[in-house]
Image: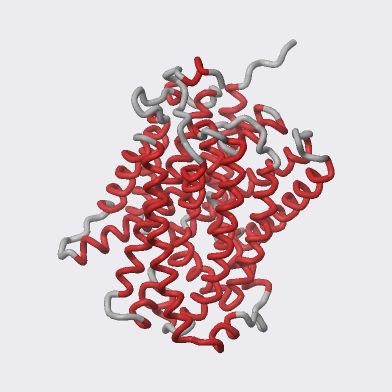
């Protein structure tokens, strides 16, 4: 990009180093979120096979990540990996992928925000106040929006700080579990005998959901100082960090959860209850504090990605052009952030007022996000198989892209098998919203030449 375009008020601020780009990916994944919410959810159905679910998900995500790295020489785009789809399959397919990412990041943000609001209400209760409906949810959403509209460097470094603190807290709990359990507990957790394929399939969706967000590093490609190096490094590093921690946590925490009574394992925050059981009084509050910080970072990371995808869709004419304006001072996609976030906050508020529990909302919204991202991951794999890429051999494209497509298809079929008949409203909503996006893309496309 030349200097003239860099100084243009319509250009996002190219100011991010590799640490900030990696922070975006790691925070959006939400490492502690997996320990506190996802692993207990997977363990309720998969039991000691939870670690197998995470191992399978890790293999699939590594293949997807390596497919994304194939596009490292493509120009950075606010649409993130949808730009890779466009490079291989054309602008129409790229816009459809960007719309799916919009839905995916929106679902992820709402899923995190629902839990974030519940933790704020818990804090209000500890301080002697009276929690009000939606107060924590609204404060969390608007607070993240205000941060996201400001300097992107500040928001990414905030995410890195909150994530680091929360990971240390959970790792401390794992040390306590190992001290109480010893070698027999470890060996029991690594014994999947008796676990069925149904158990593994039921936990696989949660495991895949745990990794979602690593690809959001690509949405900062237009704001990165060295996107060709920073984005691939962030993608690989975030998957590596998440994979190691998730497998370790899936073994250790699943064993610890087995020590709790059934009703506690099924509660909203069983890891905090486990901390209280194993540690000093108040240990559970440290876990809740870590989860609170992680949820804040994950919500902020999803919001950052959501706003940039909406910004790109506006630049392409799919969404109103006013959303393609940047903040005159911070040079962030402020209009797109506001326009994408406020309706989502309203939708989430409506769902909460309907009386759905936090766990039910998280399951529905998480499943919705998984569908969106699996669709985009598969489109990227097809794009890699379709187009020759600079510096990438044909054999490598075929091996990596083909393996990625096969892995995503297998995970997708397993996921659909587990939700058809159980989450039909979620499936129907996803299909209808994708059809709406397709209609908007077709409307914005230039007429074909006669």
> Which quadrant of the structure image shows residue 392?
top right
Q: Nearer the viewer, residue 342 or 171?
A: 171
Q: Position of residue 270 (x, y in %)?
A: 40, 73
Instruction: Identify the image quadrant of the N terminus.
Output: top right
> Residue at the bottom extreme?
184
Q: Residue at x 63, y 43 (%)?
A: 376
On screen, residue 78 above or below 158? above
Asked if one can make out residue 113 in the rendered structure from this viewpoint, the answer is no
At 61% from the left and 58% from the top, the residue drawn is 420
Q: Is residue 1 above or below residue 63?
A: above
Q: Quadrant of residue 207?
A: bottom right
Task: Give the farthest residue toward the top.
Answer: 450
**Where's residue 170, x and y in %?**
42, 68
Query: Which residue shows up at 41% across the image and 25% down it?
Result: 326
Residue drawn at the location 53% of the way across and 31% of the way down:
222
Quadrant containing the C terminus is top right
């Amino acid at each position: 990009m030349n200097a003239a375009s860099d100084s243009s008020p319509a250009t996002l601020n190219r100011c991010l180093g590799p640490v900030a780009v990696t922070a975006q990916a790691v925070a959006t994944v939400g490492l502690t979120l997996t320990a506190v919410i996802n692993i207990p959810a997977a363990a309720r159905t998969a039991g000691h096979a939870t670690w197998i679910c995470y191992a399978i998900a890790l293999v699939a995500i590594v293949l997807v990540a390596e497919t994304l790295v194939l596009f490292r020489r493509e120009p950075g785009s606010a649409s993130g990996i949808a730009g890779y789809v466009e490079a291989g399959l054309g602008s129409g397919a790229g816009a459809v992928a960007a719309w799916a990412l919009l839905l995916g990041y929106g679902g992820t943000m709402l899923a995190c925000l629902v839990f974030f609001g519940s933790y704020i209400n818990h804090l209000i209760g500890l301080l002697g106040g009276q929690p009000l409906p939606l107060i924590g949810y609204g404060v969390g959403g608007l607070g993240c929006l205000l941060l996201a509209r400001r300097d992107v460097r500040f928001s990414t470094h905030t995410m890195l700080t909150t994530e680091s603190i929360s990971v240390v807290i959970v790792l401390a709990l794992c040390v306590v579990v190992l001290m109480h359990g010893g070698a027999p507990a470890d060996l029991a957790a690594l014994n999947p005998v008796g676990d069925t394929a149904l158990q593994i399939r039921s936990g696989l969706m949660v495991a895949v959901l745990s990794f979602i967000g690593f690809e959001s590093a690509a949405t900062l490609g237009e704001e990165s100082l060295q996107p060709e190096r920073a984005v691939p490094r962030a993608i690989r590093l975030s998957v590596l960090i998440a994979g190691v921690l998730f497998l370790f946590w899936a073994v250790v925490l699943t064993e610890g959860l087995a020590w709790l009574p059934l009703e506690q394992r099924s509660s909203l925050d069983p890891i905090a209850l486990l901390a209280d059981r194993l540690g000093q009084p108040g240990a559970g509050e440290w876990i809740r504090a870590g989860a609170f910080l992680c949820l804040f970072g994950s919500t902020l990371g999803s919001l950052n990605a959501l706003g940039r995808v909406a910004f790109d869709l506006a630049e392409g004419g799919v969404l109103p052009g006013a959303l393609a304006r940047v903040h005159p001072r911070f040079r962030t996609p402020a209009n797109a952030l506001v326009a994408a976030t406020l309706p989502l906050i309203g939708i989430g508020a409506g769902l909460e007022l309907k009386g759905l529990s936090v766990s039910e909302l998280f399951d529905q919204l998480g499943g919705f996000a998984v569908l969106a991202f699996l669709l985009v991951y598969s489109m990227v794999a097809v794009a890699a198989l379709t187009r020759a890429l600079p510096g990438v051999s044909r054999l490598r494209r075929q091996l990596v892209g083909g393996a990625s497509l096969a892995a995503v298809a297998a995970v997708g079929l397993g996921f659909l098998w587990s939700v058809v008949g159980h989450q039909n409203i979620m499936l129907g909503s996803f299909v209808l919203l994708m059809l709406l996006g397709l209609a908007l893309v077709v409307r914005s496309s230039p007429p074909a030449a006669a």
